[in-house]
């Protein structure tokens, strides 16, 4: 139920033409991993409303499934708890108001609460800056039970010793009897101490005692193992020696605070013997007696490494979701701007001749590069639908050699190793070219003094055993190896090279998006990528893409291809709310021979369809003000004029036509486009209508 709810409410998880199954699988793994935690995890947005949770939340807090849903207000949970007495007695509305006021002024916090059923929960709140917060609940009932057991047994033993000692002092029994009794008590104490040590070694917590000189006098097995030592090895060592200089500098201020008699809680991280960073949360209680003053510290710690990893994964997923939403929203505005720029520049180029092209050609090229950059960003954020086809990868690489030779310094030699027979991969050819260019430029930058770059293409069979490791289905793939003899990459940085905006280049020399886009494109295409690098010797980037059969020969069309086909006076109704975009499209249609009626909204377009019977073609933007967009306008046209052809335009990353099932195949022209692209779309639409009739 958790996985289904989160999928349906996550905008980046919606399948797009069947190419996001890999992303769904990874998302399922994340959800399944969170559900395996013993701790309860819940994420609330800034409203605050529930965004995500794991199964432990329902188990630990006894919430009904009907209450726990995406978008549930935080106040609903507070009110539910107040009604069942979780916060004690008193005015329920006052209890709810106090807790909601605390949430709205949210600060990081850590507290414990004993539930009416006797369960003791450790509650921790972590803010997500500007987005919301994460709440974590841990069941510490058993841990508190063991603490009480230890305290009660110590108290009982001390009372017994005092009582027996008093009896012996008042007794006239012989010294031998007294000594025997004392020996019996001492034996019982030893057994009790052994039992306590066994309990302390068995509980899932790290327990230690440090004297006033910051030297260990006791540590249970878990605490010693945390530092890679035995209980015997850690006793007598100083805290600074066990922690190491870096970690000790973090905990030292907290120990000084506890020296004043205060109970202190804190978190710290350290690097263990395997080189892995581990995290712990500690509580330090001063050991103070009336007779002897400050004696040292009691330390209780919990390993929170996995909890930190889960929090980091959740926050990273939210950050990537925000990047995807921002990119998808900006695409519409950028594509509208680029439609205006490209349309006007192309028209100016046709009207101007001679030296003006010297200025217009670079401007047009730059505008089209901007459109391609938006496309690549959308591919990375999983919001751009790829257009895969059977591509002869050897031909693609071979055609790129000349381009790469011009783009790379003369001091870098470029060699290729291509298959003798054509090898086809199911991939978007433009994105494949972009990926190879990105990798080649990265290789060039890694060889400022010159070197060698090689691109090798081969067939690769991936067995089921290897498929599980590389996270792709078993089968036949096309393998690409891009290898350079450059400076290599620091091993500590290798895990981060695919992160967006992370770059190893100097400030201003790289955006940090190149490898991220390559990774997004390859994963979205059903492949995978990995990097092997040795500092001072070079880097090898290897990626695989699904292999496919050669495409079938395309059927020849009865219509000759023409960039300037005549509109034959057919009246077009153009609906577009952006004035400059509408003007550019109107001019393009006029140059193609189409008279145009233009409107700025779907409402005006509906009126035109109702009143003007001479309209023979409807061209509409997908999103317009007034509640009537392209999809709705297409449905209205289907009711008023069932045979009226419709062409939709969009500047968004992903736009599908919904509504009337008989018109789900309406073509969509993506912005930005020029007159030739518009002409081709109209020709394709006319050919389709002729075939249908």
Image: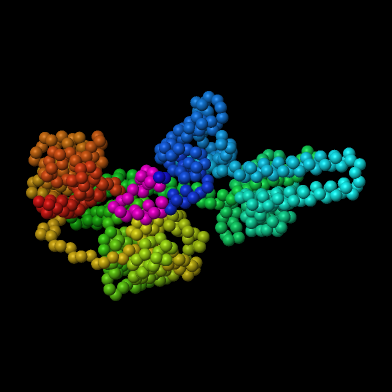
Please state which of residues 433 and 633 is positioned toward the viewer in this rendering: 633
Q: Which residues are magenta?
A: 3-28
The magenta stretch spans residue 690: no
The magenta stretch spans residue 11: yes
Q: In the picture, residue 538 is in which quadrant?
A: bottom left
Would residue 385 be seen by someone viewing this image from the given angle?
no
Q: Where 489 sits versus 651, above or below?
A: below
Percent across and percent down for residue 441 are 38, 63
State left or right for residue 292 relative to residue 657: right
Q: Where 155 sits versus 549, above or below?
A: above
Percent across and percent down for residue 581 are 23, 44
Please state which of residues 121 and 155 is positioned toward the viewer in this rendering: 155
Would residue 193 be seen by someone viewing this image from the given angle?
yes
State left or right for residue 516 relative to residue 260: left
Please state which of residues 112 and 282 is positioned toward the viewer in this rendering: 112
Percent across and percent down for residue 355 are 21, 56
- Residue at the far top in the pictured view: 91
Which residue does the image show at 56% across and 55% down from the upper left?
Answer: 277
Q: Where 679 sits versus 424, above or below?
A: above
- The number of numbered discs placed on residues in the rendered structure image is 0
Q: In the picture, residue 122 is in which quadrant?
A: top right
Please state which of residues 477 and 256 is positioned toward the viewer in this rendering: 477
- Quarter occupied by the N terminus: top left
State left or right for residue 561 relative to residue 317: left
Which residue does the image show at 33% across and 59% down from the upper left?
Answer: 525
State left or right for residue 187 relative to residue 102: right
> Is the magenta region chiefly helix, strand or loop?
helix
Percent across and percent down for residue 659 are 23, 42
Q: Where 200 sits versus 72, above or below?
A: below
């Amino acid at each position: 139920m958790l996985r289904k709810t989160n999928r349906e409410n996550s905008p980046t998880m919606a399948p797009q033409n069947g190419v996001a199954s890999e992303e769904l699988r990874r998302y399922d793994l994340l959800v399944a991993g969170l559900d395996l935690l013993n701790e309860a995890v819940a994420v609330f947005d800034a409203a605050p409303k529930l965004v995500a949770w794991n199964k432990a939340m329902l188990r630990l807090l006894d919430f009904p499934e009907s209450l726990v849903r995406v978008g549930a207000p935080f106040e609903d949970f507070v009110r539910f708890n107040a009604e069942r007495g979780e916060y004690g007695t008193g005015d329920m509305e006052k209890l709810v108001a106090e807790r909601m006021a605390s949430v709205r002024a949210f600060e990081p916090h850590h507290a414990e609460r004993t539930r009416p059923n006797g369960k003791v929960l450790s509650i921790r709140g972590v803010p997500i800056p500007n987005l919301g917060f994460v709440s974590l609940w841990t069941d510490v009932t058993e841990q508190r039970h063991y603490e009480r057991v230890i305290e009660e047994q110590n108290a009982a033993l001390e009372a017994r010793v005092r009582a027996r000692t008093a009896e012996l002092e008042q007794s006239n029994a012989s010294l031998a009897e007294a000594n025997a009794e004392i020996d019996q008590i001492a034996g019982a104490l030893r057994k009790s101490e052994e039992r306590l040590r066994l309990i302390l070694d068995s509980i899932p917590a790290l327990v230690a005692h440090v004297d006033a000189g910051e030297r260990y006098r006791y540590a249970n097995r878990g605490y010693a193992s945390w530092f890679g030592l035995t209980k015997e090895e850690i006793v007598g060592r100083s805290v600074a020696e066990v922690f190491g200089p870096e970690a000790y500098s973090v905990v030292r201020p907290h120990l000084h605070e506890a020296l004043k008699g205060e109970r202190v809680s804190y978190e710290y991280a350290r690097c263990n013997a395997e080189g892995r960073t581990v995290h712990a949360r500690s509580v330090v209680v001063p050991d103070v007696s009336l007779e002897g003053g400050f004696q040292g510290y009691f330390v209780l710690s919990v390993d929170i490494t996995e909890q930190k990893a889960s929090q980091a994964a959740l926050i990273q997923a939210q950050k990537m979701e925000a990047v995807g939403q921002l990119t998808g929203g900006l695409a519409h505005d950028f594509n509208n701007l680029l439609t205006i720029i490209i349309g006007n520049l192309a028209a100016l180029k046709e009207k101007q001749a001679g030296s003006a092209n010297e200025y217009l050609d670079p401007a047009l090229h730059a505008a089209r590069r901007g459109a391609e950059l938006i496309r690549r960003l959308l591919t990375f954020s999983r919001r751009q639908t790829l257009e895969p086809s059977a591509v002869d990868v050897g031909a693609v690489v071979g055609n790129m050699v000349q381009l790469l030779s011009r783009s790379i310094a003369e001091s870098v030699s470029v060699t290729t190793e291509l298959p003798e027979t054509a090898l086809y991969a199911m991939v978007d050819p433009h994105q494949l070219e972009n990926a190879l260019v990105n990798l080649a430029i990265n290789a060039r930058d890694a060889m400022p003094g010159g070197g060698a770059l090689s691109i090798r293409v081969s067939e690769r069979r991936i067995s089921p055993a290897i498929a599980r490791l590389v996270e792709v289905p078993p089968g036949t793939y096309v393998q690409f190896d891009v290898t350079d003899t450059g400076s290599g990459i620091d091993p500590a940085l290798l895990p981060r090279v695919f992160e967006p905006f992370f770059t190893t280049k100097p400030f201003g020399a790289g955006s940090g998006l190149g490898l991220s886009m390559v990774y997004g494109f390859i994963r979205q295409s059903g492949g995978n990528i990995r990097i092997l690098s040795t500092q001072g010797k070079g880097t090898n980037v290897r990626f695989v893409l699904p292999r496919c059969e050669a495409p079938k020969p395309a059927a020849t069309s009865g219509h000759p291809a023409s960039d300037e086909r005549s509109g034959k006076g057919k009246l077009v109704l153009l609906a577009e709310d952006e004035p400059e975009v509408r003007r550019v499209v109107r001019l393009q249609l006029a140059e193609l021979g189409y008279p145009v009626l233009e409107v700025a909204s779907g409402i005006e377009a509906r009126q035109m369809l109702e009143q003007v019977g001479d309209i023979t073609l409807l061209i509409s933007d997908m999103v317009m003000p007034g509640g009537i967009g392209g999809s709705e306008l297409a449905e209205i046209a289907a009711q008023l004029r069932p045979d009226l052809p419709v062409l939709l335009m969009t500047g968004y990353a992903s736009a599908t036509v919904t509504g009337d099932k008989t018109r789900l195949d309406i073509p969509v022209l993506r912005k930005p486009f020029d007159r030739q692209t518009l002409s081709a779309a109209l020709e394709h639409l006319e050919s389709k209508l002729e075939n249908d009739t």
